[in-house]
Image (tube, grey):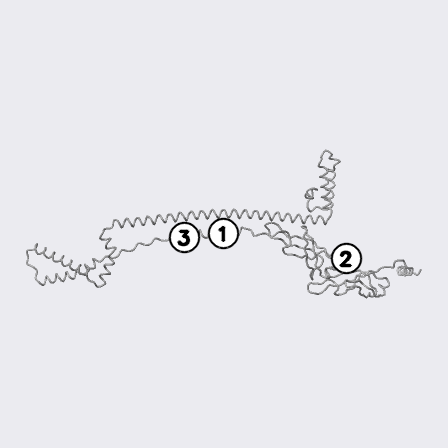
Amino acid sequence: MRDPYSLLGVKRDAGADEIKAAWRSKAKSLHPDHNQDDPLAAKRFSEVGQAYDLLKDPERRRRFDQSFDTQQTIMQQREAARQAEERAKAARARAEAVMEELARANAQRAQAQAQQQAQQQAQQQAGAASEPAEDMVERIFGSGAQRAAAGGGGSYRAQQQSSARKGQNSANQQAGQQSSGPKPNTQQQSQASSGAKAADPSQDQANKVEPEEKPEAPKPATPLPLQALELISTLVRRIRGEVPPPEKAPDLTVTASVSLEDLLELKPSQVTLSDEREVWFALEPGMSDGHVLRLKGQGLRLPNMQRGDLVITLQVRKDNRFRLEEFDLHTVLPIKLEDAVLGGEAEVETPGGIVPVSIPAWTGSDQTARLEGLGLQKEDGSRGDLVVEFRVLLWEKPDDKVIDLMRHMRYGLFV
């Protein structure tokens, strides 16, 4: 059946009179006698009648409004979940694009570093090829020759001194041939010899070859920048935050009708749901008419959603003997006129049986008597009371004496 409000053309908060007037107008305009050419007139007229039958009954209208609101809530939650899934999917796509771009940039950087290292190695090889042979030998074996000389063998230093003396003697011979002066004396020769010897250490130091510094090792590839890592972690957190957890289905609210005896004795009760499930629940101390009970995970079961709760509202069935007000029971006790005036004893029915009750003298219909501990059990373990409401009743047949007495009280005369 379609929405009865839309069929009658009224709002959801329309009153009973407005709904009745809309139904009359629709029924008059859609009556098959006035639309004989329309084959669907009878169907539309029937739908309007069904809509009015539903909305004029307060209980059926309440149940329809409740189910309609539940359906609207479910549709809204499904739409919200669908939109959240689309946002999460778009965020994942953006994150994958960013990751691909970072991977491509990292590969390009690694390729550039490899090319740079290859160029440095080629330059080092080219420099080594243009290096003189003596420098290469000294660069390679210089440190070993120094270690051999420092070790005490003396061969390397003796060769240097021998070559130095030969060079000094050849220089003296050339100087003697070119000069026509007297030859130097023995003292000058000894001084020259000592000077040549003194020059040996300087020449020895000059002939030493300092080892060339080793080329620096190529630096390892730089890792991903810190900003890129922070960007990736932020995107991951954002993606995780946008993925919605399974949402909870709306609560299913029902009304459970229980008897007063079951509530007094706290017996287990059951309620039948719209999906034909029968759910049992326990009546506990502190429950009364209108009490709301919530059962976790016993509500609606919808795909891709967490199961909702079952919310049960207790409704105590009407009892001809007692009336329930919170945890107290109320009962009406009819009393005779003479008992109301003079007082007396009577019996009253309670949930536990018949008990006597005293009627004070001059008791009116506005007075009550309270029997403690005969009501419903409270949450703290105590019980409510049974409140006896007195009602003064006349005799079944008129009594002449009572009539004369009332006339005397009204007019002050004896008849």
Residue matched to label 1? 236
The amino acid on which the numbered mark 1 sits, given as a three-letter code, is: Val
Q: Earlier in the sequence, mark 1 or mark 2?
A: 1
Give the camera-side residue of 299 and 287: 299
Give the camera-side residue of 185 and 107: 107
Report the side of 286 relative to 238 (left or right): right
Residue 112: image location, x then y, percent: 37, 48
Residue furthest right as drawn: 415
Residue 27: image location, x then y, percent: 74, 40
Q: Is label 3 in contact with label 1 (beta carbons under 8 Å)?
A: no
The amino acid on which the numbered mark 3 sits, given as a three-letter code, is: Pro
The amino acid on which the numbered mark 2 sits, given as a three-letter code, is: Asp
Residue 254: image location, x then y, percent: 68, 53
Number of marks in the rendered image: 3
Residue matched to label 2? 319
Report the side of 166 relative to 37 (left or right): left
The 10 Å Cα crowd at callout 2, few under 14, some 14 to 19, many 20 or more, is few
Kindly identify which numbered label has been placed on residue 201.
Answer: none
Q: Is label 3 in contact with label 2 (beta carbons under 8 Å)?
A: no
Q: Earlier in the sequence, mark 3 or mark 2?
A: 3
Q: Earlier in the sequence, mark 3 or mark 1?
A: 3
Residue matched to label 3? 223
Q: Is label 1 in contact with label 2 (beta carbons under 8 Å)?
A: no
The local secondary structure at tag 1 comes to helix
Q: Quadrant of residue 144?
A: bottom left
Report the side of 282 relative to 163 (left or right): right
Quote the CA–CA distance across marks 3 and 1.
20 Å
Quarter in which the C terminus is drawn: bottom right
